[in-house]
Amino acid sequence: MNGVLTSGTAELAPLPRAYFERDALVVARALVGARLVVRPAGGAAAPRVARIVETEAYRGPRDLACHARVGLTKRTRTLYGPPGHAYVFLIYGMYDCFNVVSFAHGKGHAVLVRAVEPVSGLAADESTAGPGRLTRALEITRADDAVDLVSGERIFIAARDRRPRIAVSARVGVAYAGEWADRPWRFYDRDSAHVSRPPRRSIGRHGERG
């Protein structure tokens, strides 16, 4: 399977491995506006397509907000694996979070996809703002951990169809990471109504500035 499909009049094809073989900080910005495509299990239903509108970069073991800080474990095996794969983990015992492994094997870099905007196969008012909500809407689960995003067989990412206006902030919900929480490593489409709206106090260590 070459992974190429048609959504409306647009042809969607998986981005190449080289796209993901870059620092998570580069990939996180580049992913805003890209299309996330999920083929439902069994293949009978139409694929779900959503535009990525919010991401966060996590940059390996030195980044104290990144899971890679604990080293190679059963949970982080995929994170430390080759780029271009899905890293899906559970938080708060109830929410699956979808991440894209980047940079290089063994580096522990990944990009968290925090929000998407429905394009097709989803209701226009579907709740997709927030990492747990988007995985529920797209039916991405921990069973998708380590899925190859380049093969196009189950989940893949296609190029942007337009250039977004990108805003930047500190990451959300990682105050425990100290000064690392204040790094401006969250990227979002300033024109999208589907970007998450976290409480200001949860952004960085001391809330969003400015």
Image (tube, rainbow, N blue to C red):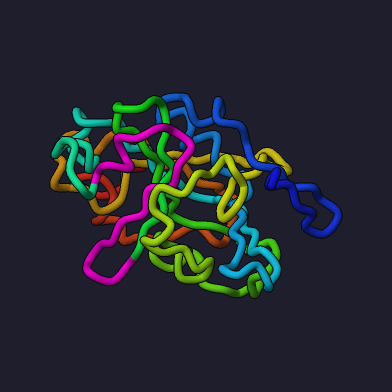
Of residues 179 and 71, the one nearer the viewer is: 71
Say which quarter of the image contains residue 194: bottom right
Of residues 124 and 199, the one nearer the viewer is: 124
Of residues 185 and 9, the one nearer the viewer is: 9
Q: Which residue is found at the position 70% from the left and 65% from the top?
A: 120
Q: Is residue 173 magenta?
A: no
Residue 66: percent from left, percent from top: 24, 40
Q: Which residue is found at the position 75% from the left and 52% from the top?
A: 5
* Quadrant (top left/top right/bottom left/bottom right) for the C terminus: top left
In the rendered view, does 196 fall on the left or right side of 16?
left
Of residues 121 and 141, the one nearer the viewer is: 141
Which residue extends farthest right? 9
Residue 146: percent from left, percent from top: 40, 47
- The answer to whether residue 184 of the structure is visible from this angle is no
Residue 110 vertical placement versus 208 (above, below): above
Say which quarter of the image contains residue 92: bottom left
Residue 126 vertical placement versus 31 (above, below): below
| Range drawn in magenta | 76-95
In the rendered view, does 100 fall on the left or right side of 2?
left
Q: Is residue 94 magenta?
A: yes
Residue 12: percent from left, percent from top: 73, 47
- The answer to whether residue 125 of the structure is visible from this angle is yes
Q: How many marks?
A: 0
Q: Which residue is found at the position 44% from the left and 60% from the top?
A: 196
Magenta stretch mostly in which secondary structure?
Answer: loop
Residue 47 vertical placement versus 17 (above, below): below
Residue 27: percent from left, percent from top: 48, 32
Residue 209 vertical placement versus 37 (above, below): above
